[in-house]
Amino acid sequence: MTEDGLRGRVFLVTGSGRGLGASLARAAAAQSARVVVNCRSDVKSAEAVTAGVHKAGGEAVALRADVSSFPEARTLVEQALSKWGRIDGLVN
C-alpha cells in the first residue's frame, strides 16, 4: 500500500449496516476510501454507518439491495458506478 493508503479508492461493502461489515466500512473510510455501505433490509442502520463516516470526514453512501437477487445486485453496482465512476474492491 502506498503512503496514501486507500485514498480515492471505492469499496462496496455488503452487509455493512452493522457488525463486521460496518467495522470494515468504517476502517476503509478511515483510510480515505470512498465506501458504499450496503444492507439487505435495514437501511436505517446503513445510513447510521454512513453518517458516522461523514462525521469523521469520510465519504460514503448507503444503498439497500439484496445481493442474492441478481437484478438488485446489478442495480447496486450501477448506483455505485454512477456515484463514483469505479469500484476498486468488494467486501462480501
Image (tube, rainbow, N blue to C red):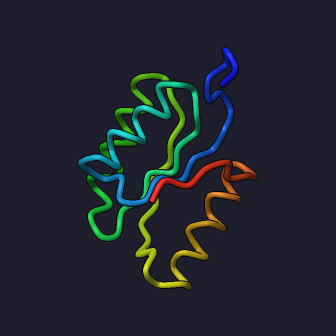
Q: Relative to 8, say whether 63 is above or below.
A: below
Residue 69 pos. (x, y %): 46, 84
Residue 38 pos. (x, y %): 42, 58
- For the view shown, which residue lies furthest in the front direction? 1
Figure quadrant of residue 42: bottom left
In front of the other: 19 or 2: 2
Judged left or right of residue 82, residue 70 is left
Residue 65 pos. (x, y %): 44, 71
Q: Quadrant of the N terminus?
A: top right
Residue 79 pos. (x, y %): 62, 63
Q: Relative to 85, say whether 67 is above or below.
A: below
- For the view shown, which residue lies furthest in the right direction? 85
- Residue at position x 53%, y 44% in the image: 35
- Residue at position x 34%, y 49% in the image: 21
Number of on-image labels: 0
Judged left or right of residue 67, residue 21 is left
- Residue at position x 68%, y 33% in the image: 8
Q: Quadrant of the C terminus?
A: bottom left
Q: Relative to 33, say whether 35 is above or below.
A: below
- For the view shown, which residue lies furthest in the top direction? 3
In front of the other: 22 or 49: 22
